[in-house]
Amino acid sequence: MAIKFGLWRVDGTQIKQLPPETIESEKHLEEIIEARVQILGLGDLFVVGRQVITDFGKLIDLLAMDGQGDLYIVELKKGRTPREVVAQALEYGFWVKELSFEAISELYAKHHQGEDFDSGFTSHFEADLPEAVNTSHHLVVVASRIDTSTEQIVEYVRDYGVPINVLFFEYFRDDEREYLARGWLADLESEVPSPTGKKQAPWSGQDFYVAIGGKGVTEDKKWRNWEDMRSYGFVSSGHGHKYHKALSNLYEGARIWAYIPGSGYVGVGDVTESAVPVHQFEVDVDGERMPIMNAPLKATNMDHDAQDKDLAESLVRVDWKRTQPQAEAFQEKGMFASPNVVAKLRHPFTLQRLREVFDPDGDFAKPSLKPVTLK
């Protein structure tokens, strides 16, 4: 049965009913929801992206995740008939159910200026990512009302396990005050989880992917340079708080696999000291200890904004087990790569090939770094 709201203002013995009004624009409702996603009543949600483009060129209004790693697709009516919105939501669900952990990470980075998904989730929930993400998903249609035919469609597909629900918002105005009333077509406790989903591979608790990229490698090499990193034992990033935050995930004892975007993997090593600002990092040159900025460097502008905690370069000390020049980078089709500066490396095929090729622990014979086609 479609929801009907009523709202009354009580001033002593004076009772005044407030008639529902049409909200000035669907965009205004979207802005309200996006500014405070908790208003949906779905608990604490972490926004993966807004206006997310699917593989078939459509836009998901809001894609979010809860603390258990389940995805939520939120679609606003936006002038379309409710039946059209329901059909659209089902199409989005078909696409979302196949999203892997890597795909979700890339979507998050795209919609959050390259920020690391793992770091963002941990910061939001103050808890680590669950080992499995997108094991179920939920479709939420937001509308002011639906007709009987649309309600029947929603109830029918729900009976067959499709995790869809309709959220109703009614808008009221009382002088200068605005009110939203919220209700659901079906009880949230009766939500049926989707039987399909994608799990990320278990993480070793040690292996990290680190992108050696940006201007320092692919353009003018003024800010950071892979050959400096090889020579003095470090990885670095800068030009923004999000990059410092990403490097802060690298703890002492972590193993990093260095990757140059567009080239491939170039080294493996163990972290021996966590991230520090460039002006605090020292290196040994011919037996003499000195600040890295006094050492011979190919990155001539590494000290850019050195006193600015947000813009300065951050360095993590690394004991390299094996490195290669960029010209000899290793890459094979199907290996993990990410736009994030730091990511947990859990992709089984990538780890297997890297361990065989770089052999950090001496467990394998060291083959050539030329790509090998596996049968």
Image: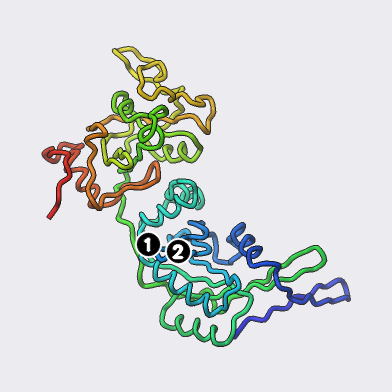
Q: Is residue 318 left or right of residue 294?
A: left
**Residue at the image position 43 percent from the left and 41 percent from the top:** 246
Residue 4 lies left or right of residue 102; in this view the side is: right
Q: Position of residue 288 (x, y in %)?
A: 33, 12
Given residues 60 and 272, the one toward you in this image is 60
**SS of the residue at dot 1?**
loop
Of 46 and 29, nearer the camera is 29
Q: Position of residue 153 (x, y in %)?
A: 49, 84
Q: Is residue 119 above or below residue 67?
A: above
What amino acid is labelled 2 in the image?
Leu
Q: How is the image coloured?
A: rainbow
Instruction: Say if mark 1 contacts mark 2, CB within 8 Å.
Output: yes
- Mark toward the viewer: 1 or 2: 1
Q: Compared with residue 161, is residue 326 higher up or lower down, i.e. above or below? A: above
Q: Position of residue 99 (x, y in %)?
A: 37, 62
Q: Who comes first in sequence, dot 1 or dot 2? A: 2
Side of 115 relative to 28 (left or right): left
Residue where numbered disc 2 is placed: 71
The amino acid type found where label 1 is placed reads Leu
Identify the element where label 2 is drawn: strand
Most foreground residue, 274 or 283: 283
Residue at horizontal 48 percent and vertical 77 percent from the top: 87
Question: Where 133 falls versus 126 (above or below)?
Answer: below
The image quadrant that residue 22 belongs to is bottom right
Q: Residue 214 at what x, y percent from top left?
A: 40, 37
Residue that sits furthest to the right in the current view: 13
Question: In the picture, which quadrant includes the C terminus?
Answer: bottom left
Q: Nearer the viewer, residue 211 or 199?
A: 211
Identify the residue position indicated by label 1 in the image: 99
Residue drawn where x is 59% and y is 84% of the image: 147
In which quadrant is the N terminus drawn? bottom right
Give the distance between the C-alpha atoms of the residues marked 1 and 2, in whole angstroms: 10 Å
